[in-house]
């Protein structure tokens, strides 16, 4: 049996781990049992990337949400009736907190009545077995896997299995959801579930899908890593018209979607993990006219506050492109500062759709050259500190000046950076230590050796041979303290020559 807590510790990002620990602490303080559920556990088991954290508590999650807000988290959506809260935790980590509940349907296809329940009842009422798994985060049972519908076996068989014959009858939107999960994960539909699906289509249950539910699926597909395979699965089953007949007629802009997905991979390589749901949604609806786009979003249940950023997204991205190629952005450091503040989703959109070479070159330089230089800036700070510059406002200013120079290609090597840092900081290079003077005795010994060689030679050396010791003697005379010693040696040499002559 896998160690699920080890998987959590190793698979979660630091931000996700911090969010999980905070929810655990608050739940324990409030006396609530808390569990990690749904897509988080499914993706953990299958090895897929953990996009968000889904928590289920046996209690009212609004009390947890209020405490999270005090710590800097943002509540994005709060459904008081269903006690479902979508949260953006600190560190840009997405998640949701829901109350454990059971559904009771007065008649098929209607909104269910809600009854608050235990976690086991909550899991049994879910759509598919692979989404009906939980991991306990409670102190007494931390890491315990809860799998009342045997979803783990279905995951091992790579199958999507509905939990009830009434699954599609009670919630027809699950017809879309079934194909989305199967396409995303590359799973097949379990045989009996396929029979129930075919029966629901034959009975035209897909025509009873609520527009808001269809809109939720449209939002969900825009967040998929492979939206194209999901959309094509819907088209093949003739369910795209459920999202909107205009979209079914004109088809999604698959080329634009694929361009955006390619850009996303480039951003991943550069260390970005952007949420591209907005540009992906625009790519899906890219063949629609502006008026048609507004109509589709309105029918899909988008509120005015949600529609406005979608409808103005392209305009804002093009305005950013215009600024990027303007005169104010000619200096690389200005372009860097501009792109650093530009939302990543707009950066991705421009990379996918812009035909301005000037804008594209700056964005690519920002991703693959400028940001790596920025990440290496602590090394520059260490080099400046090693020169003796104390940290402070001027210190930071010099580091920023060096960064601006690096963006233009200067200061690539440590030697170049040292020269720049010394010039900007005013720290002069220390003078090199002078070579110590040699002792005179060594020079005298050399001259004495020349004289001794003349004494024991038997005969006076030839003119050519005589020049060499005299040259060495002259050289020795130029050195400090050697002149007196050399004079004595020369006197001994003359005296020895006279004695030889008298013989």
Image (cartoon, grey):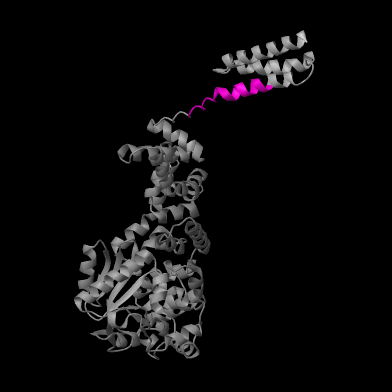
Residue 490 sits in quarter: top right
Front residue (pair 174, 405)? 405
Please count the marks in the image. 0
407 in relation to 223, above or below: above
> Which image quarter holds the N terminus?
bottom left
| Residue plotted at (69% across, 15% down) | 470
Image-based side of 32 in relation to 336, left or right: left
> Which image quarter holds the C terminus?
top right
Percent x, y of residue 202:
46, 87
Residue 159 in view, yes or no = no
Percent x, y of residue 183:
49, 76
Percent x, y of residue 111:
29, 82
What's drawn in magenta, residue-wise?
A: 433-449
Let me know if residue 71 is in the magenta part: no
Front residue (pair 254, 478)? 478
448 in relation to 1, above or below: above
Image-based side of 36 in relation to 501, left or right: left
């Amino acid at each position: 049996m896998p160690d699920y807590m080890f998987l959590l510790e190793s698979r979660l990002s630091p931000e996700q781990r911090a969010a999980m620990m905070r929810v655990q602490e608050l739940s324990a303080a409030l006396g609530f049992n808390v569990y990690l559920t749904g897509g988080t556990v499914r993706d953990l088991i299958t090895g897929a990337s953990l996009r968000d954290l889904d928590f289920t508590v046996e209690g009212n999650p609004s009390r947890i949400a209020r405490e999270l807000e005090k710590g800097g988290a943002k509540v994005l959506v709060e459904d008081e009736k269903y006690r479902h809260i979508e949260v953006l935790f600190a560190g840009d980590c997405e998640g949701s907190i829901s109350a454990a509940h059971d559904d009771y349907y007065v008649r098929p296809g209607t909104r269910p009545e809600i009854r608050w329940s235990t976690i086991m009842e909550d899991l049994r009422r879910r759509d598919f077995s692979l989404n009906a798994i939980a991991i306990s985060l409670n102190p007494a049972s931390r890491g315990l896997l809860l799998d009342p519908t045997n979803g783990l076996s279905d995951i091992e068989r790579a199958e999507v299995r509905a939990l009830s014959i009434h699954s599609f009858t009670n919630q027809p939107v699950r017809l879309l959801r079934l194909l989305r999960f199967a396409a995303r994960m590359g799973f097949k539909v379990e045989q009996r579930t396929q029979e129930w699906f075919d029966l629901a289509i034959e009975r035209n249950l897909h025509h009873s899908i609520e527009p808001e539910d269809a809109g939720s699926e449209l939002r969900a597909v825009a967040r998929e890593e492979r939206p194209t395979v999901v959309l094509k699965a819907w088209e093949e089953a003739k369910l795209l018209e459920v999202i909107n007949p205009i979209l079914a007629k004109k088809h999604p802009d698959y080329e634009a979607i694929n361009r955006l997905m390619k850009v996303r991979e480039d951003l991943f390589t550069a260390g970005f993990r952007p949420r591209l749901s907005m540009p992906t949604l625009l790519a899906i609806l890219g063949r629609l006219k502006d008026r048609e786009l507004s109509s589709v979003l309105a029918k899909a249940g988008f509120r005015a506050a949600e529609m406005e950023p979608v409808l103005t997204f392209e305009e804002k991205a093009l305005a950013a492109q215009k600024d990027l190629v303007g005169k104010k952005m000619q200096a690389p450091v200005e372009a860097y500062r501009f792109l650093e503040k530009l939302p990543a989703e707009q950066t991705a959109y421009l990379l996918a759709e812009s035909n301005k070479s000037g804008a594209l070159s700056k964005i690519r330089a920002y991703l693959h050259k400028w940001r790596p230089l920025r990440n290496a800036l602590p090394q520059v700070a260490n080099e400046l500190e090693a020169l003796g510059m104390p940290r402070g406002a001027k210190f930071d200013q010099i580091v920023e000046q060096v960064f601006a120079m690096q963006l233009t290609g200067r200061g690539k090597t440590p030697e170049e950076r040292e020269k720049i840092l010394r010039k900007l900081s005013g720290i002069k290079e220390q003078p090199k230590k002078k070579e110590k003077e040699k002792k005179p005795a060594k020079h005298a010994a050399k001259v004495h050796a020349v004289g001794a060689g003349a004494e024991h030679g038997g005969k006076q050396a030839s003119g050519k041979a005589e020049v060499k010791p005299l040259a060495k003697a002259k050289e020795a005379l130029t050195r400090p303290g050697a002149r007196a010693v050399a004079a004595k040696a020369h006197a001994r040499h003359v005296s020895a020559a006279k004695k030889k002559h008298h013989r």
